[in-house]
Image (cartoon, rainbow, N blue to C red):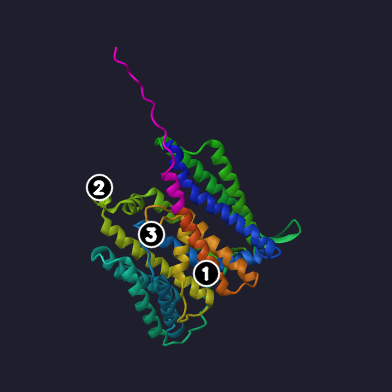
């Protein structure tokens, strides 16, 4: 009974959100007359939501430490974009040197906030709220209220270009990108191999594993979805370059959170900080790392978003922290910390991206879009809390007792 209960608790949120994503895609695909899943629009969805995925992965690590959030990420995105504009457009620095400097700035910002949160023990809400104001002010000072544009092509290629977009062939009467098609097949194969290796590893260590039928169904469905996704991209210009960045980040952080000691310690910290500290976990170091990592990824998102806009604007990043937080909670992260996955965060980001894109195609005003996203976020967190309450109050089976009689 306990095993069934824990399995339900672990999978209910993630699988329900995955089902919700499928329903949302079908719903908007029908309402938009098939425009949602047109190859060009699928590429646009990747470009439009890349920054949300990047920020959400970083925010997940902050939330894992105990439900903490970083309210400064939108301002850090704006600050890094402003620095990139100043370095590249105004000062004409080398593009690669400028990118490296922007990433260093992100790390320094994270170290500043992490110090106050981890070692001085000022609440993360206060520190990052202060950072939101400070870094937005620095952005305005750097740009002097102006917008810098345009960026050179060798900077834009990293996040707005396509990989081998000229490699097209005629396939079933349509022009498709062969590199993109092959990439989809290879990614699906790698996913299946990784799942099989992980299953065998868990069996060897004595952990609970999915049944062979369940694993097979999972691999078939996800592999088919991956190949279908890359097929849609192949019908337009091929693989967006920013998708490579996202793929690397998702693989690295999935491995980090599931296969490394530090990753497991993050979950332990969020589960019970005092117990983790008594067990030898360096909780202060982990908290510091989480916020340095968050600002580093905010710097990456800032570079990607500046290239997307082809400009550095003083209003960039407004509300980005809410998108990242929403993606994490919708994707199954617990508001109390210690629970959440990179895969679930990706699903949450995709749900928000599909909502934004679908409503925009339908011509729904941005004001109403905010209302819908707010209700979806509240519903996701409420589902998390209520499902846990229901599971905690599930009736427990009483152990049979043997009655004895005195003779």
Residue beneath label 2, please?
279
Task: Find out whether residue 406 is within the magenta segment.
Answer: yes
- Asked which secondary structure carries label 2, the reply is loop
- Is mark 2 in CB contact (under 8 Å) with mark 3? no
Q: Earlier in the sequence, mark 2 or mark 1?
A: 1
* Residue at image point 57% right, 56% down: 21
For discs 2 and 1, the disc positioned in front in the rendered view = 2
Q: Which residue is located at x 50 percent, y 44 percent?
A: 195
Work out whether 146 lies above or below 235: below
Q: Which residue is mark 1?
A: 159
Please tell me the numbered disc located at residue 63. 3
Q: Residue at x 37, y 56 (%)?
A: 336
Quarter of the image with the N terminus is top left
Residue at disc 3, secondary structure = helix
Q: Nearer the viewer, residue 394 or 370?
A: 394
Asked whether, in this view, residue 153 is left or right of residue 391, the answer is right
Mark 2 and mark 3 lie on one chain; the one further toward the N terminus is: 3
């Amino acid at each position: 009974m306990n095993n069934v209960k824990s399995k339900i608790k672990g999978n209910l949120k993630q699988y329900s959100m995955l089902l919700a994503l499928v329903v949302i895609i079908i719903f908007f695909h029908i309402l938009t007359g098939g425009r949602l899943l047109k190859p060009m629009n699928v590429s646009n969805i990747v470009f439009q939501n890349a920054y949300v995925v990047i920020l959400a992965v970083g925010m997940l690590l902050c939330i894992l430490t105990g439900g903490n959030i970083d309210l400064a990420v939108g301002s850090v995105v704006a600050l890094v974009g402003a620095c990139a504009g100043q370095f590249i457009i105004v000062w004409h620095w080398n593009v690669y040197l400028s990118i490296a400097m922007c990433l260093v700035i992100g790390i320094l910002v994270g170290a500043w906030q992490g110090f106050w949160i981890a070692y001085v023990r000022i609440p993360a809400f206060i520190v990052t709220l202060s950072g939101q104001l400070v870094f937005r002010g620095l952005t305005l000072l750097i740009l002097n209220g102006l917008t810098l544009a345009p960026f050179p092509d060798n900077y834009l290629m990293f996040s707005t270009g396509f990989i081998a977009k000229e490699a097209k062939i005629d396939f079933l009467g349509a022009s498709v990108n062969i590199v993109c098609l092959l990439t989809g097949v290879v990614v699906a194969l790698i996913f299946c191999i990784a799942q099989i290796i992980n299953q065998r590893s868990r069996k060897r260590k004595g952990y609970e594993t999915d049944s062979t039928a369940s694993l097979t169904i999972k691999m078939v469905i996800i592999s088919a979805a991956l190949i279908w996704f890359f097929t849609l991209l192949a019908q337009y210009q091929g693989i967006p370059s920013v998708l490579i960045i996202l793929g690397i980040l998702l693989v690295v952080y999935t491995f980090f959170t599931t296969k490394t000691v530090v990753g497991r310690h993050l979950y332990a910290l969020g589960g019970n900080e005092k117990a983790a500290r008594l067990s030898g976990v360096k909780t202060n170091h982990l908290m510091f790392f989480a916020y340095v990592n968050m600002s580093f990824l905010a710097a990456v998102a800032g570079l990607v978003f500046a290239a997307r806009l082809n400009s550095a604007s003083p209003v960039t990043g407004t509300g980005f922290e809410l998108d990242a937080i929403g993606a994490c909670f919708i994707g199954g992260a617990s508001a109390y910390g210690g629970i959440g996955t990179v895969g679930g965060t990706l699903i949450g980001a995709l749900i928000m991206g599909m909502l934004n894109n679908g409503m925009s195609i339908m011509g729904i005003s941005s004001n109403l879009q905010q209302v819908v996203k707010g209700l979806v976020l509240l519903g996701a967190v409420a589902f998390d809390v209520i499902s846990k309450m229901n599971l905690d109050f599930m009736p427990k089976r009483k152990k049979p007792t043997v009655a004895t009689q005195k003779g």
